[in-house]
Image: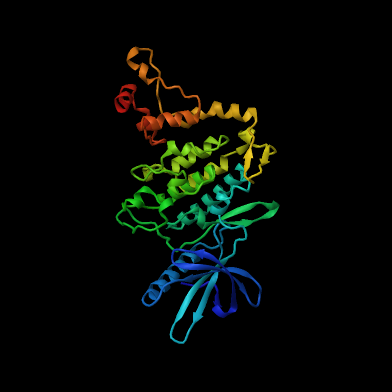
Amino acid sequence: MALKRLYARDDFDVLESLGEGFFGDVYKVQHRYTGEIMVLKVGKGRGRDRIRIKANVLKEVDVLNQLTSHPNLLAFRGVCVDLTEKSWNLHILMDFCDAGSLSRLICDHQKYFEWSLRCSLARDISYAMDFVHSKGIMHRDLTSMNVLLQKVANRSLKAVVADFGLSCKIPQIVEKLTQVGTPFWMAPECLKEDFYDEKADVFSFGIILCQMIARIDADPEAGLYRTHNFGLDYVRFTAHCPTDTPLDILNLAFQCCLMDPAARPSFMSICDFFTNFRLSRYKDYSDHSSWLVESDGRLERSLSDATSKYWKSKQSELFSHVMIRKEQSSRNQRLIISIASLEQFTCSLHQFHLILDYLQFSAVTSISCDNILQFIK
């Protein structure tokens, strides 16, 4: 294993604490001689844990050396050596991101988060993860907290994926990995301690997409509800979606969160999606001049009549594969469900406890009227 560059621990001044990673504390530091600002990841633990920490650092450095030179991965700067009389420790040095984390941007409702930027950042993440998977590596802790933002030209932002402390080689079908990660972003197969592979990263990406769509935390109590088998509760989540949500983006998020890992798209196909996706087809989203700042400081958008009409014409597409038909015979009169709005539809589904796996098209579309009636009796 080749180290990119070695630094001495005494060459850095700690400027501030940036938080915690899975295996260590993270600090903003400045090189005393060059003035460069970097991030120092210090392993935590004592006694015998030090041996484990060193092994984890060396493992992460090995991964980072394989993932160099991608614009959407946090740049690895080198290793910092901390020498003492009786021992030595290694710490990882990374680029410092001046715009914080994606998680902070999502939850900061004081800042306007236009759809073009959301799509651009999602594309950046997919490019990074496609590269990671192409190297035979899976992240295993892809969260909005581990997606950092960097300022680029034209006052815009780009996303970089960080923290490969839990990453590993993509397993063979006979291998079973340990359960690791941050629970709110973990795929159902991980939470159930079943076999999982790189498609677990795709599920995590789907959760991040849902966060970006609804601008909520990944906590189920915040709106990203899970079903009894740890899948995403699509029906309850849609109640938190803004009315100008691009349906293609919502569909992609739902595809990424399918229960069946094999049915989820690969990051290569997700990259293709963003290459071909054009936000301009959603014409009514391009005018941001109607955003108002209210007295409480929160931003709200006054939707134009055109946008409202657009949404009303499109909202039924969200559940276009739930085939509930109105029958003329008296036998099926109880099945007549009037869907005047997305909220009313969601409420109706809650009332009947009808939890549907949104994109399991073959299963959903095969439900007959008689079967639904029998289910909701």
The residue positioned 32% from the left and 50% from the top of the image is: 192
Q: Of 162 and 352, which appears nearest the observer?
A: 352
The residue sitting at the front extreme is 295
Q: Of 97 and 292, which appears nearest the observer?
A: 292
- Give above or below for 72 relative to 325: below
Q: Is residue 321 visible in this depiction of the protein? A: no
Q: Quadrant of the C terminus?
A: top left
Q: In the rendered view, does 296 fall on the left or right side of 199?
A: right
Place of residue 225 in the rendered image (x, y in percent of width and height, measured from the top left) = 42, 43
The residue sitting at the bottom extreme is 85
> How is colour applied across the structure in the image?
rainbow
The residue positioned 38% from the left and 75% from the top of the image is: 51
Place of residue 286 in the rendered image (x, y in percent of width and height, measured from the top left) = 66, 37
Q: Is residue 241 visible in this depiction of the protein? A: yes
The residue positioned 57% from the left and 40% from the top of the image is: 276
Place of residue 207 in the rendered image (x, y in percent of width and height, measured from the top left) = 46, 47
Q: In the rendered view, does 122 fall on the left or right side of 44?
A: right
Place of residue 63 in the rendered image (x, y in percent of width and height, measured from the top left) = 46, 64
- Give above or below for 121 relative to 36: above
Q: How many marks?
A: 0
Quadrant position of residue 150: bottom right
Q: Of 334 and 186, which appears nearest the observer?
A: 334
